[in-house]
Amino acid sequence: MINEKIKEKIVLALDVETLEDAKKLVDELSPHVGTFKVGLQLYSGFGNEIIDYIKSKNSNFFLDIKLMDIPNTVKKASENIVLRGANFYNVHALGGLEMMKQSKEGAYKAAEKAGRKPPLILAVTVLTSISQDVLDNEIKINTNVKELAINLAKLAKLAGLDGVVASVHELKAIKEACGADFKVLCPGIRPLWSLKDDQKRIATPKEAILNGADYIVIGRAVTCAPNKTEAMQKIYDEIGEI
Ligand code: C5P
């Protein structure tokens, strides 16, 4: 029996090269996965096909394409994303308050037009690939990475967005700054038994959930496992009752 409370929190990253591989993951894992995440790689190659496939399985999909452009362009793109049926999507908080507000306006207008529930809109604060050194010496934004991430999370909240994407290590500070209802989706998740790969600041699924993560992104720990269903079941077992 699938624990529905855990399933709702699991977002599977479909980071694969071919449409066939993505479809196989959806086929095999949809009983265990609440939401499938389609990122730039898959979207730029096979966006329409994979979205239709996920929808045909009645699963949720998260379009992880981190919108950032002028407010009007982001508004129009957000409308289309919602008409396409996305249950979640994200924008860069660095695009500013007005851009985020317009994104929400476009998304909600489209949801109303389609007679659908509005999507969850998340903001990306500071990419984890941006270190303090990059901020200081390349981009030359004179602030501390963590402070910047918290300020951008607060800006996303002010714009009326639902939450942010953030590491488990920032989870507490974000919930403190933005409130317990402000959603946090956490990548960098590694079960006890899996490889770290290139992720630096990791946490186990259980730690993430105990610390208040609303959603956890599961990627290579499952997608690269020889037996993917078994790997997913091990994650459920490791999380236990919540
Ligand atoms: O395979 P792995 O579990 O490392 O995959 C993590 C997923 O989360 C990838 O799709 C990656 O792009 C995404 N992500 C991340 N770190 C962020 C934001 C997104 O790893 N800060």
Image (spheres, grey):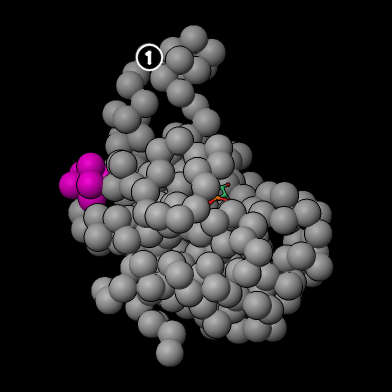
Q: Residue furthest top?
A: 137
- Can you say whether 179 is above or below 110 in the image? above
Q: Quadrant of the C terminus?
A: bottom left
Name the amino acid, label 1. Answer: Asn
Q: Is residue 76 left or right of residue 231?
A: right
Main SS of the magenta segment?
Answer: helix
Could you say whether the residue bearing mark 1 is in a helix, strand or loop? loop
Q: Position of residue 49 (x, y in %)?
A: 79, 69
Is residue 81 located in the magenta-colored stretch of the structure?
no
Between residue 182 and residue 53, name the one nearer to us. 53
Q: Position of residue 90 (x, y in %)?
A: 52, 53
Q: Residue at x 38, y 73 (%)?
A: 237
Query: Does any atom of ligand 1 lie closer than 8 Å to the CB of label 1?
Result: no
Q: Is residue 19 left or right of residue 65?
A: right
Q: Which residue was labeled with disc 1?
A: 142
Q: Residue at x 59, y 54 (%)?
A: 220
Q: Quadrant of residue 110?
A: bottom right
Q: Position of residue 150 (x, y in %)?
A: 30, 37
Q: Residue at x 40, y 38 (%)?
A: 201
- Can you say whether 1 is above or below 210 in the image? below
Between residue 6 and residue 35, name the one nearer to us. 6
Q: Is residue 176 left or right of residue 193?
A: left
- Can you say whether 7 is above or below 213 in the image? below
Between residue 24 and residue 123, name the one nearer to us. 24
**How packed is label 1: few (under 14 Cα within 10 Å), some, or many (20 or more)?**
few
Is residue 176 located in the magenta-colored stretch of the structure?
yes
Viewer can see residue 105: no
Q: Is residue 87 left or right of residue 191?
A: right
Q: Residue at x 40, y 55 (%)?
A: 192
Q: Which residues are magenta?
A: 172-178
Q: Quadrant of the N terminus?
A: bottom left
